[in-house]
Image (cartoon, rainbow, N blue to C red):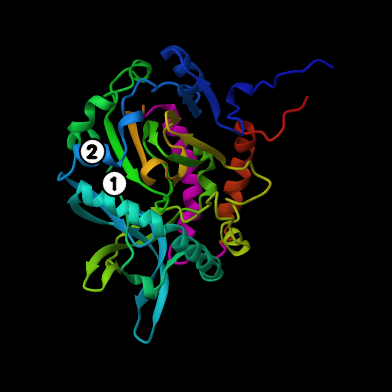
Amino acid sequence: MPACIPPNAELDLGTEVQRVAWPITPLQFYRDFVSRNKPCLLTGAINHWPALSLWNQTYLSHKLHVKQVTVAVTPDGRADAVCNVAVQSTDCSDHKPHFVLPLERQMPMADFLQHLQHQQASGKRRSSLRIGKQVADAVKAGVNTISEDRNASQQEVMYIQQQNGNFTSHFPELASDVDSNLPWASEAFGAPPDAVNLWIGNDQSVTSFHKDHYENLYAVVTGEKLFTLLPPCDAYRMHLAHYPLATCTDSPHGLHVTPSGDSQQVLWCPVEDLAGAPCSVQHQQHFPAYFNAALPKPMRISVKAGEVLFLPSLWWHQVEQKAGKDNMVVAINYWYDMPFDCKYAYFKLVESLAGSDADCNIGKQHEACTSTALQTCDEQLLAEVHLCRPTTISC
C-alpha cells in the first residue's frame, strides 16, 4: 500500500528539533521554520565568529577586568522561579511557594569570573544535596525548597542574565567578536533585532519554564545549553498559577530570601523537568498535565558551542547548562520582534482556556485541581496537540 501524507502534515511540529546545516537562505528559513512557528538547530552559521576561539576566562578578564557588571545572585541558581520559602507565622515557621527574584549585584568582571571557577568546583556536591532534598520536599509541595538553613545562605550562584540588550549597551569591548545581527535572520524578519543579550554562567544556573514574546536566535559560544521545549498549544500543561513575590537580599549572615509581604502576585509555571535529575513520583503527581504519558513528550535539544537555536515566539522553554572551557557557559541571543497577528490571537485563545485552571489554583497552587475547567481544557486542546504533534502517523 503506498504511503500517504495526512492533510494536516504541514502542521506537524514533530517530536524532535530539526537540525539544519548551513547555508540556508532567508527564504528557506522563513518558509520552513518562521512561518510554521517551528524550532530548528542551525549548525555552521556562526563558524566565522572570532568569539568561538577567543572567549575564555583569560581573554574576558583581560578585556573587561575592572568593568562593573550586573550579576543575578541566588542561593540555588534559580532566578525568576517558583520555590518554597520559609514564612514566619504567628506560631511557627512554614514553607510556602513564592516567585523568587534574584539579587542584582554590581561587581568587577574579573571577580565574577573568579567566582564562577570556585562555584563550579564545589557545584557537583551542592547539586546532589539539593536534588536529594527536592525529592523529600516534593511530597509536601512539588517544587524546590529554599530551606531555613539556606534562607540565609553563604552559598551564592551568580549568572549574567540581564535581558535588556545588555550586550550592545554594556559590552562594546566584545562587539567585534560576534555579528551585531544575523543578516539572514534580519532579512527573514524584515528588521534588525530588538535586543542582543549576553549570558555567562555555569552548571549551577537553571532557567525555569517560561515563554517570550520574541523570535529568538540563541547562539552558544562556549559550553552547552540544554533546552526543554513545548509549543504554545501546550499552555494548559504548564500548571500556571499565581504566586506571591519574594526577593533575594544581602544580610549580615549571607544571602536571604524574603517574601515581599504585599499583595503582588506573579503568574508562573512551577514545573521543573531537569534532564540530569529524574523527577520523583510525587513531583509528577503534583503536575499531572505536564507528565501525562498519553501526551507527546517535551522536545529536548542540546545546543553546543558554535550552534544556533531558533526558538519561535511563545514557545515554553526551560534551560540547563553544561560548562565548557574555563568552567563557563557563554551565549549570545538575538531577540527579533514577533508579529502580533493571527498566531498571537490563537495563542491567547489557548492561554485563556488554560488560564481558567490557573484561576482555580490561586491560594492552593500545589493541590490537585479537579475543576471542570481543566477537564474542558484537556478535551478541547488534546485534539490540537495531536494534530500538531502526532505520536504516530498511519493511513
Q: Position of residue 14 (x, y in %)?
A: 61, 30
Q: Badge 2: few (under 14), some or many (20 or more) residues near its Cα, within 10 Å?
A: some
Q: Amino acid at mark 1?
A: Ile
| In this rendering, the label closer to the viewer, 2 or 1 | 1
Picture disc at residue 160: 1
Q: Quadrant of residue 57?
A: top left
x, y percentage for residue 183?
Answer: 33, 17
Q: Using the numbered discs, state the Cα–Cα distance from disc 2 to disc 1 in whole angstroms.
A: 10 Å
Q: How far across and down, in percent of the image, does residue 191 sit?
A: 29, 20
Depth order, front residue of 264/205: 205
Q: Looking at the rendering, which quadrant does residue 76 occupy?
A: bottom left
Q: Is 245 on the left or on the right of 284, as rendered?
A: left
Q: Which residue is mark 2?
A: 166
Q: Residue at x 44, y 12 (%)?
A: 25
> Could you say which disc has been placed on residue 268 in the image?
none
Mark 1: give few (<14), some (14-19) or many (20+) Cα within 10 Å: some
How many numbered badges does the structure rendering display? 2
Viewer-closest of 60 and 3: 60
Q: Per the image, is 196 magenta?
A: no
**First reached walking from the N terminus: tag 2 or tag 1:** 1
Q: Is residue 392 above or below residue 117?
A: above
* Element on which disc 1 rests: loop
Q: Amino acid at mark 2?
A: Asn
Q: Quadrant of the C terminus?
A: top right
Q: Which residues are magenta?
A: 340-368
Query: Is 349 included in the stretch rendered in magenta?
Result: yes
Q: Are marks 2 and 1 in contact (CB under 8 Å)?
A: yes
